[in-house]
Amino acid sequence: MPVVIIVGTQFGDEGKGKVTDYFASNSDLVVRFQGGNNAGHTVVVGEKEFKLHLLPSGIIQNKKSLIGAGVVIDPKVLVQELENIKKINSNPNLIIDPRAHIIMPYHILLDAVHEESRGNKIGTTLRGIGPCYAERSYREGIRFEDLIEESRLREKLKIIFPIKKKVLECSYGKEVDISLEQLVKEYAELGKKLKQYLGDVSLLVQEALDAGKTVLFEGAQGAFLDMDFGTYPFVTSSHPIAGEAFVGTGIGPKQNLKIVGIVKAYTTRVGSGVLVSELHGELADNLRKAGNEFGTTTGRPRRIGWLDLVLLRTAKRFNSLDEIVVTKLDVLSGLDKLKVCVAYELNGKQVKEVPALTSDLEKCKPVLKEFKGFKIADCKSYSDLPKEARDYLEFIEKELKVKISMVGIGAERNKILNK
């Protein structure tokens, strides 16, 4: 299949990095198309663990890795990630689209003061993602093409920086302790370090497809953090659904493609917002510990819930999923019993899709189905899984009417079972 799109079906943290790394082995290009360093992908190779926030996961295998125009880039973070990757590969095969927007220090400051003024309500990662995307919509943003040309960067910042400085100092009482010239010099230097990676991602992807090559699109976050279709306002500032792969890269949607949804075997989310199947107490604590459910970017503990089929049915619709990969099944190992949310109860009726009205979603209660627990030992194939584990997976498949292609039973690259 020339185009494969990997998307999260829940609230992010589903294990997309590991699955992308797996698919990357048979791909010619790997593309990030949205988000920024608010997302974190962890890939484990042998004894080494790589935490990536901006770089596509394919970079670890030295696949041609592209950052599309839909991504917002903190150049400080990107330079640091490249330095880490150079420890295993001295010449990373990376291309950055000139149209990608750049996160500046004032974006990070604005993120912090906005979150503080809301009483930390949204739970932003404070990485400047939202203000950067907002500035892009205002048509005032700094793009990668500006970063690599000092005179162009200076002219743009002469207009933008005084406005941001005044807003921060006068409206929020936040001191900005950097001058215009210091900002220009610091970021122009970052531009020099990154200029070698400049390339037209849209054109390169289209040329690769025309040549019959395989392109893997790597999504960040998950469907229910989508700016429009997620649990607004507790969402991210971009569109982590399959359609954005085309918009954020700059190619048309008429492709021969496969869309793969990544499903964690239970549900997690970071920060505020509705989580209908949420668990509390000792069981939640145990699952959090077993699954190491702490944010890759923030380190914050993730909230825990039973697997929610209502979310997944709706994610299937948003993304036109062809297949799913279930990850972290091993985290459920050892439970005597486990449950799945099969529907929501809303105003005395059962609903099987996520309500469009936030006020309705907030009233929903989980309708749960109980399953026997299982213990996963050293399984080498799908058939090695206990019958109870296979029953759990096949129930998911039947309810969603989407095939499960693989099952993850551990963090390592080789802990994936083909179904």
Image (cartoon, rainbow, N blue to C red):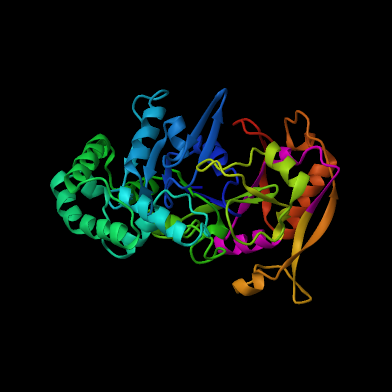
| Residue drawn where x is 79% and y is 76% of the image | 348
Tell whether position 242 is magenta: no
Figure disc tally: 0
Is 82 on the left or on the right of 306, as rendered? left
Q: In the picture shown, does residue 269 fall above or below 382?
A: below
Question: Residue 392 appears at what percent x and percent y?
Answer: 79, 48
Q: Quadrant of the C terminus?
A: top right
Question: Residue 290 appears at what percent x and percent y?
Answer: 70, 37
Instruction: Determine the image quadrant of residue 193.
Output: top left
Q: Nearer the viewer, residue 294 or 180?
A: 180
Q: In the picture shown, does residue 199 fall above or below 416?
A: below
| Residue drawn where x is 53% and y is 65% of the image | 232
Q: Is residue 238 visible?
A: no
Q: Nearer the viewer, residue 261 or 212?
A: 261
Is 400 on the left or on the right of 180, as rendered? right
Question: Residue 310 appears at what percent x and percent y?
Answer: 69, 62
Q: In the picture shown, does residue 7 fall above or below 287?
A: below
The span shown in magenta is 310-339
Instruction: Determine the image quadrant of residue 47.
Output: top right
Is 322 on the left or on the right of 182, as rendered? right
Tell whether position 327 is magenta: yes
Identify the residue at the far front of this view.
173
Instruction: Determine the image quadrant of residue 363.
Output: bottom right
| Residue drawn where x is 46% and y is 30% of the image | 61
Is 378 on the left or on the right of 244, as rendered? right
Q: Is residue 73 visible?
A: yes
Question: Residue 168 appears at what percent x and percent y?
Answer: 31, 57
Q: Nearer the viewer, residue 70 or 207?
A: 70
